[in-house]
Amino acid sequence: MARRITVDPVTRIEGHLRVDCDIDQGKVTNAWSSGQMWRGIEVILKGRDPREAWLFTQRICGVCTTVHALASVRAVENALDMEIPLNAQYIRNMIITAHALHDHIVHFYHLSALDWVDLVSALKADPNEASKIGESLSNWTGNSRKEMAAVQARLKTFVDSGQLGIYANGYWGHPAMKLSPEVNLLAAAHYLQALQIQRKANQIVSILGSKTPHIQNLAVGGVANPINLNEPSTLTLTELTHIKTLIDELGTFVNEVYMVDVGAIGAFYADWTQYGAGVTNYLCVPELPLDTRGTKFELPGGYITNGDISTFKPLAGFHDAEFEKNVSESVKHAWYEGDATRHPYEGETEPKYTDFQDNGKYSWVKAPTFKGKPAQVGPLANVLCMSAAGHEPTKKHLGRLLGIVEGLAGSKIPLTALHSTIGRHAARAVRAGVYYEALNNQWNLLMENIGRGDTDTFNPPVFPKGEQSGVGMHEAPRGVLSHWIVIKDGKIKNYQCVVPSTWNAGPRNAQDELGPYEASLVGNPVADPDRPLEVVRTIHSFDPCLACAIHLHDPKTGQRVTVQAL
Amino acid sequence: MNIEALGITRRDFLKYCSALAVYMGLPAALGTKIAEAAMSAKRPSVIWISGQECTGCVESLLRLNHPTLETLILEKISLDYSETLSTPAGHLAEEAMQKAIEENKGKFLLVVEGAVPVKDGGIYCKIGGKPFVDIVKDTAQHAAAVIAIGSCASWGGVASAEPNPTGATPAWKVLEGMKIPVVNLPGCPANPYNFISTVMHYLTFNKLPELDGKLRPKFAYGRLIHENCERRPHFDAGRFAYAFGDEGHRKGYCLYQLGCKGPETYNNCPTQLYGDAGSNTWPVGTGHPCFGCSEQHVGFHIPLFTQAKVQQPTAGPGYPAADSAKGSPVTVGAAAVLGAGVGAVLGASAVVAKNLKKASADQPTEKHPE
């Protein structure tokens, strides 16, 4: 007899997520993913100046800060068929990569590591042994015996205080926790060090973007940063040199710590390569434009069908009709009127809250599909597609990570192992390696371009009379993001966002096929239904962001709002 | 708290606390008291609940350097619940929160992040099956004080922008009549140093810092951005940027003509900065106008490129005083500029006056709603 469990709220994510599972004989047999909050930001945008839409959309999410700002200015620029100065592309690209590095590091260490690492067990560790393990795996200078002893003392003081705060009721001593006390201590040290290093990534974003969360240097047509090597109060060599210093520090951590830790977790929890595959149609878009029109990119995009990498098909860029044509969404199981499946440009929706119905409507998130099928987006989709596209840095970092796992596990790890809960963590680490190189490259490109005497950062937008529409794409930390805008006489007529966590957290679609979160949970082991750590592991591996996943329109005015691919 | 175990000497910690006291506008000697409070045996309980938010205010804590987030939650406070940070999920997290409320009744600080949707019985945000509006009320009644962090909790923020589809409401309004002290820390997100200094003030002196009429701590929100802006001399001298990338913009001139809301927004951005990353790390510093994210009725309400009302016009030393008896606030601001004489960039005071009413040829100024 199956037992029903409800995890609400799912913590250590962004936003409000409820997950329900049926558990039978120690395994998940059915699952439901339900978004629990809605604000209506697209409704708020109607009638406003397209040049300020990004200030509103960025507030969709403070974890995925920057991404909804970028997608928004790209959508308006796409509608106006604008070119963007090279310097502006490079500055945006540096913000994209620096933000993603912060995001991936925080996701692994602070939002999901405690699914695999037992902090309480670290108190029993021998700091000498922990240091030896760390030093055998990498050249990182933060693995010394003294460091391990200091971290252990700090933890002990904290635990002895009896006030465990956010760590109270954690999964300490859970049977699914497998690491030795020494490895747990090493991970605890890196948990604290990662907090320091992610601040460096944020400083890069702050210097270029004014602040973070929520940058304020964008403009439709470029960026608001003036480059003037001979004036204070502009972007000068002082700031750019500071940024380069921070990039180098980040690179060391990504290569010597993050990548190694994920490899080690993968090796110690190799059984988790069997769980959590779920939906294996993968979708990503190209990112880091290298020209003023957005036709050449540093990172390729495309899609893969049924987990078969040989099916990879590339997506060309911001104007790719293949993408634009083939996205639709179903509201059959979401809290909106009706059960239609429509293209984002054609949809009409109106909220209809019914509370949670297993076989009916149960989420504010809609169910998007690509070519009629659910698709998984995010780092795993990105890494598999970039690898299939022959992107050398991706292949290099993926090879290195798999090598670390194989070295520790003592067995060959096939690429198919990536279709899993642990595979999503691995892909995120690989992408961090790729992003660090890309960040460095974008910094070099900016310096070279300034050296050539080009200091342009802004082309003024011109809004003609009549109607224009455009899509802004972005490969965000959590995957494919697209903003769709219709402009009429210089004002926003319609606005929609199709967001990574909508793709992944969506409920069942029109054919009652499970969304990626749901499908990935089926078959997961659950040792103790009262402490369903394994469910949390798989959900966290997607890096959920629920504020992003949900937005739409006004229930009471009776106003019908076109579209909404969330 | 055992600071020595953290590798911090008592002397260094006292120095840090004295600096913190000065930052909060208090005598340095009070640093000792702050240090004692911080080192007291039991760490004070803080419960952080999240409603219609984007988690940006939690994210901002990750950028703290002095002290760091880890120091804050391991050694200064006991953060007993946060949907974003709590290790356990579901009922295990809810149990931990209920236990913390029971054990710290009347003593814990409640932080509310996000707006509170009240329309349709509060269905637009539910946690653990319960509408957020009920969670706010039920939790606040046991708290010592409430800190509404960010513009959403302080005045509704982005979710409350027209047409406010979900009835997004600020925390103080939901709690009206409950006799619970509320402090607002607006900003999108709030500067994390304004949060930590408010918490330290409360823990040290057992009371909230002095608040203004909008429940904001004066140490952080007592001055208009315009009053402490490093570009203020350009405003007074009539030197403006009129478009991104123009000559004035590339010389670091005042962004007033681009719609900067510094003249009507109270916050300490220009002095506190963001991310501890050097001198230009705030919006105006990088060349983008302030859009008033922390000011009620300004951010998300007045369009980005619409000119601000100059609330407290003053001319720089040596310039004729502005005659505030004449004309609209914008005209008064113009007086300050005209008082500066001929704008070097523009060439003639008549042009200055004209341009104060017109951001630039391709960016027509919109009427400021009253």
Image (cartoon, helix red, strand yellow):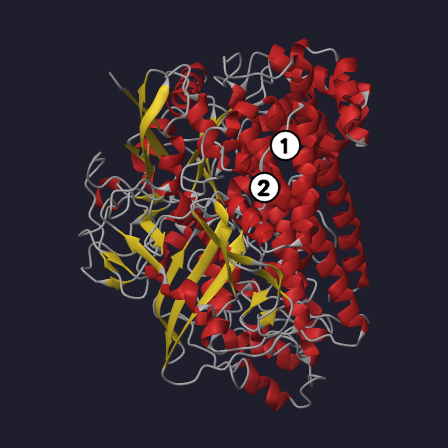
- Against A261, residue A226 (above or below) is below
- Against A74, residue A159 (above or below) is above
Residue A493 rendering spot, x and y as whole percentages? 33, 71
Residue type marked 2:
Arg
Real-space CA distance between mark 1 and mark 2, rounded to the nearest whole angstrom: 9 Å
* Circle 1: element type: helix
Q: Nearer the viewer, residue A545 or A317?
A: A317
Which residue is at 81% across, 18% downward? A145
Residue A333 rendering spot, x and y as whole percentages? 24, 44
Classify 10 Å Cα crowding around label 1: few (below 14), some (14-19), many (20 and above). Answer: many
Q: Please identify the residue farthest to the front as the structure is shown.
A: A310
Could you say which disc has been placed on residue A262 in the image?
1
Q: Chain of mark 1?
A: A
Contact, mark 1 vs mark 2 (Cβ under 8 Å)? yes
Reading the image, the residue beneath label 2 is A428
| Residue A437 can be seen, yes or no | yes
Is A431 left, or right, of A367 in this rendering?
right
